[in-house]
Image: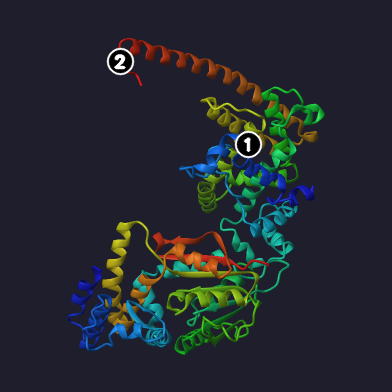
Amino acid sequence: MSNTIRANLSGPSIRWLLSKPIASSPATSCCSSSIVPRIRLRRRYHSYQHPAPGPPFSRPESAILSASLLHVPSHGFTDAALSFGARDAGYLDISVNMFSRGVFDLVRYHLSTERLRLGDKVDFRKPEPELPEGLRNLSIPAKIRVLCMERLRANAPIIHRWQEILLKLTDVVSMDLLMKALAVMSLAENIPASVSELARLSDEIWFLAGDGCHDTTWYTKRATLSAVYASTELFMTQDNSNDFEATWEFLDRRLNEVEAAGSAVSNVSSYLDFTVHALANVLRSKSLPFF
Amino acid sequence: MFAHPLSRRLLSAAPSKHLRSVVTRVAVLNSTPTSLNSPPPQNDQLSSEPVTHFGFQTVKESLKATRVAEVFSSVASSYDTMNDVMSFGIHRLWKDHFVRSLNPGRRPGGRPMSILDVAGGTGDIAFRMLDHSEKANGDRGTTVLCADINADMLREGEKRAIQNGYDSNRISFCLENAETLDSIPDNSIDLYTISFGIRNVTRIPMALRSAHRVLKPGGVFACLEFSKVSPAFLDAIYQQYSFSVIPLMGQLVAGDRDSYQYLVESIKRFPSQSEYARMIRDAGLVNVGKGYEELTFGVASIWKGVKPLE
C-alpha cells in the first residue's frame, strides 16, 4: 500500500498522461508546428486543442504531501499529519507554511493523485488483447462501473478518515454557532476546488472508458456520473460490509437509474433536435434565413 | 500626481522648514532642479555612485540608509500610536493574521524554532510570535531574535520587552543590516519575518539573498508589507488618503511631517505584489501558492517563500 501512496506525480505514466494528448496526437502535430494556437486556456478536461495543464503540485509540495498521506490513517487529515509528513520528507515543522490552504491541500493532493493514477490501473483505450482477463469486451456502462470501483477502492485505506472530511464539508448541525460559521466559511472557500476536482474525475473516467462523444451528452454524462460518484463515496464512508459489497450494490443501483434516466433524456433531446431542424427547414423553404 | 497640489495646500500653514522640503520634492519629481535648497539630481546621476529612491527623491545609495535611519529615529517612540491612528488599528489585525497564519512554535515531537524578525526593532511581531507559540502550541522554548538597523527602534523594543515581562532568554535584540545579516550564521533560522521593513531597505535583492543564506533548508521567509490596492476606485481613495491625511496626522500626532511624508512615498515606490513575488523567487526561494496573499483589498500583503532542500 505504501508504494502506491508514495509514488507521486513524477511517475512516468502520469507524465505521459499529462503530455500525451498534445505531444503525440497526429491530428494536431501538423498544426502545432506551424501555427501557434491562439487560445492558451489551460484545459480542465481531455482535449486535443488545448495544452495539458502542468502538474498541480510543485516538487517540494508533493514530497511533503505524499509523505503526509502515510500518516493519514493514524492521524486523519490534520495539521499533525502534515507536520509528520514534512519531517519525513526532510523538511522542518515550519515548512508546512508551503500549503496556503493547510489540510485542504492534503485532501486535494489525495484527490488529484488518485485521479491521475486511475489511468495506470485501468485504461480501456488500450487494444483489447492488452487488457486483463476480466476486462475485455465490456460495454461502456460496464467500463464506467469498473473505473468507479477502482477509484473508490483507492479510498479504502483512509475511508474512516474520509468520513471526517466529508462531514466537515457537508454537516454542520452538531457544532456550536462559532464552529458552524467557521465550517460554512471553509465550506464556501473549498467548494469550487472540490467540485472542479470531482468534475475532472468524471471526465477522466469517461475518457479512460474510451468514450469519444462530443455532442450535448458530453455534459449530461459527466454531470450524472459526478452525482453518482459523489453519492457512492458518501455511502462508502458508512459501509461496514465485507470488502465494501454494499457499496458496489449501491453503485450498480445508481448506474442503472442513470441509464434509465439517460435514455429518457436522449429520447427527449432527439425529439427536440428533430423539431428544431424541421422548423428551421420550414423557415428556409419560405426564404427566411434561419442561421 | 494629483496628490501634490493638495499636499502643498495643506502645507501652506506649516512652518517654513516643511514648505521647503516639499518644494524640493516636487522639483525632483518634475526633474526641474531649480530649487536652491537641494543639490540638483543630475549631480547624483553624473557621479559614479549608483542612486536609489528615498520616497520620491533620488539619493545616492550610500545615503539612503542614513536618511531612513533619521526617519525611524524620529518616529521610534510614537511609532505604534501613529500606526494606530493612520490605519484605524487595522495594522494590528494584519500582524495578528500574519503571525497566526505562520503558526510558529514547537509541534508535538518537534524542536523549538528559532525565529529571526528583521526590521523588528519595536518587537511588535516578536511579542506576537512568543505569545502565539506559548498559547497555541504550548511552547516556551522558541526564541526570537529582533534585528534592526536602527538603535533607537531596538531600544524601544527592549524597553517594551522588559515592561511586558518577556523572558530575556527567549527574545534578544541586535543591531544588524538586513542586506548582510553579518552576525547570523548560514542555515540557522527556521522562520525569517520582515514586517513593514523591506521597502526601507536600499538593495532589496541583496536582503532577500541574505534571507536565503540564513534560513535552514525548508525554512520559511515571510514578509508583511504595504502593497498596491486593486480596484481602481478604491486605489484613488487610498492615494488621496495616504498623501493628504497621513502626513497631516504625522504632524499633528507626532509633530513630524517629513517622516510620514517619506512613509507614504516609499509605499508608492514599492514594487507590485507579483513583481516582489518574482524577486523572492529570484533569490532562490519557492513561492507559496501564487506568491502572496492580499489583506484589505491589497493595502497590505503577505508574501511567503520556502527555502528548498537542495
Colour mode?
A: rainbow
- For the residue pair B40 and A59, the one nearer the viewer reads as B40
- For the residue pair B206 and B265, the one nearer the viewer reads as B206
**Residue highlighted by disc 1:** A204
Q: Residue at x 20, y 87 (%)?
A: B16
Callout 1 crowding tier (Cα within 10 Å): few <14, some 14–19, many ≥20: many
Give residue B304's quadrant in the image.
bottom right
Q: Are marks 2 and 1 on the same chain?
A: yes
Q: Residue at x 41, y 62 (%)?
A: B298
Callout 2 crowding tier (Cα within 10 Å): few <14, some 14–19, many ≥20: few
**Residue at the right extreme of this rendering:** A133
Which type of secondary structure does the marked residue at label 1 adopt? helix
The subunit letter for the residue under badge 1 reads A
Position of the N terminus of chain B by quadrant: bottom left
Q: Which mark is residue A288?
A: 2
User: Cβ–Cβ below 8 Å for labels 2 and 1?
Assistant: no
Q: Is residue B306 left or right of residue A178?
A: right
Q: Residue at x 70, y 43 (%)?
A: A117
- For the residue pair B36 and A1, the one nearer the viewer reads as B36
